[in-house]
Amino acid sequence: MPVLKDKELRIVGFLCNWCSYGGADTAGVARATQPTDLRIIRVPCTGRVDPLFVLKALFGGADGVLVSGCHPRDCHYSVGNYYARRRLEVIKRFLPILGIDDRRFEYTWVSASEGQRWQEVVTDFTARIHKLGQAPRLADASPMLKIAELALSSLHALGSNLSAPLDELKAAIKAKLPDLECVIGWQKGYDGAHAVPLFMKTPEDVDKLIWGPLNVMNPAVYLPDFKGRKIGIVVKGCDSRSVVELLQEKLINREDVTIFSLPCEGTLDMGRVNEKLGRYTKIDKVNFDEASVYITADGKEHRFCITEYAQGKCYGCVTPGAVLTDVVFGKPVPVSPGKFTPPELAMLDSMSLEERMGFWKAQMDRCIRCYACRNACPMCVCRDYCISDSRNPHWLDQEATPENKLFFQTIHAVHLAGRCTGCGECQRACPVGIPILALRQHIARTVSELFDEYKSGMNQNAVPPLLTYATEEKNIHERDL
Ligand code: FES
C-alpha cells in the first residue's frame, strides 16, 4: 500500500536472499505498511552485486538504488558482504563525478528477523528519493565543453632527458638478449616526431632504441601476451607501476620478465603537440636541448618546452624512476614532497553535479566509440571477453548514445578500481581527446582515502584492496537509514 502521497518513483532494490529478502518478507507477513516504489531483485548474496548493477540501474532510468544484505559477520557465505562493502562504498563515492547525487544510492544490512527495520529502511530511503525527485537524465543535460587549466608546476624537474645514458642501456640489453625472446621498447615512428613500439630481437634492433620525451606509449600493455616466455621490457617510472600491477595480479611471472629502466624527466602530450604542428606533409628534423624539443615541419620550426607540453600525468609524477627494475642506469630524479591534483580532476571537483553531467554529456557526444582507450590500457586484460562486446549478458547496445558511451567509460573505470596505475594511456590513445583519465584518477583517489593511502603498482606483494576484505574497516562507516 503506498504511504507516500506523490507519484511513485523508480527505485531498484538488490536484496540478499538469506537476510534482507527474508526481512522484507517478515515485514510483509506482519502487514507492515511500506511505500510501493521499490522493485526488488533477489540476489544470492550482496557479494553478487556487481557495482555495475548500480550504475546500470541509474543509467537505465532508476531514481534510486538500494542494496541490502546480511549484517557483517552474518553472511551466508561468510565474507560476501565484506567484499561488497568495499565495492559499494567505492561506487557510492564515484557517482558524484558523473553528476549523480550519491544520496540516490545506499547500501545497508537487514536480517531476516528484522521486519520492522526493513519497514523503516524502505520508508526512509523512499522518502529520501521523493525529496530528491526524479533523477536528472544524461540525455536532458545541457552539454558543457570546458577545458582544464594547465598545470605548469610539477613535483619533479621536467626536461628532455638528453643526458640519459642510453648507450649503457643498449649495451646491457645486448648482453641479456641471448636469454630473452625479445625486449620491448620504443623506436622512431613514421616520422621523427612520433615514437612507436620496438620489439628487439637482434643487436641491430637494439640500436634503434630511443629514449626521451617522445616515448609516450606504455610498453607494459604487451606483457600479458608473453606470459610464460622470457621477455625484457624498457620502462619509464609510470610504466614500471603497470608491470608491478601485472605481477600483483599474477598476469605475468616475475622470473620471466627482465626490467630495464632509466630515470624519466617527462613525456610530451602529443595531442597538444599535433595541434600546434597543424597539418603538415613532412617532418624535416627533430632536435633536442635540455628543456625542449624542436620539430621542423614543412620548413617551419616549432619549439615544445617540456614544462609546458608535458602529459598531464607527468606534472604529478612521483615515480620518475622505476619502482621495480633489474637493470638501471642514470641518476635518480629528485621528487619534491607534496600532493598534486591532476588538472582535469581539479576542474571536475570545482563543478556542481549538474555541470558535471553536462560536461560528460558534451564529451560523450564527441566519443566515436573506437575503444582505443580500452585497447591501450595495460590493465584491461579481459581481451575477447570484454563485457562491452558481450551479447550475453547484454550490458551495452550498439546505439551511439551518450548514455551507452558514458556507461562504457564507467565500466572501464570501475574495472580498474584499485588497479589503475594512472599511466594515462586511455586518454592519450583517445583520438578526440576526451579527458577520461579523470574518472580513473577519481576512483584511485577514493581507494587511497579508504585504504591507507593505497596506490596500485607500487608493491608487487600487495593485494589490491578490492580483491580482498577486512572484517573491521577503518574508513568505511555504516550509515543509518
Ligand atoms: Fe547475505 Fe552474503 S548471504 S550478504
Image (cartoon, rainbow, N blue to C red):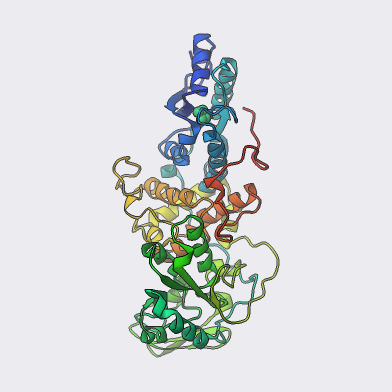
Q: Identify which residue, 223 or 475, lies in the foreground.
A: 223
Q: Is residue 246 left or right of residue 371?
A: right
Q: Identify which residue, 352 or 318, lies in the foreground.
A: 318
What is the x, y in percent for residue 377?
43, 60
What is the x, y in percent for residue 405?
38, 50
- Asked which quadrant contains residue 432, the reply is bottom left
What is the x, y in percent for residue 348?
56, 54
Quadrant the C terminus occupies: top right
What is the x, y in percent for residue 165?
54, 86
Q: Residue furthest top?
A: 30
- Asked which quadrant contains residue 456, the reply is bottom right
- Asked which quadrant contains residue 150, the reply is bottom right
Indicate whether 480 appears above or below 336: above
Residue 195 visible in rendering:
no
Q: Is residue 74 left or right of residue 359?
A: right
Q: Residue furthest right?
A: 337
User: Residue at left 29%, top 48%?
Assistant: 398
Instruction: Count every numbered label the image shows and give the total.
Output: 0
Q: Identify which residue, 100 or 84, lies in the foreground.
A: 84
User: Residue at left 44%, top 64%?
Assistant: 433
Indicate whether 1 appears above or below 286: above
Residue 409 visible in rendering:
yes
Q: Identify which residue, 120 or 301, lies in the foreground.
A: 120
Indicate whether 334 appears above or below 470: below
User: Residue at left 59%, top 73%?
Assistant: 321
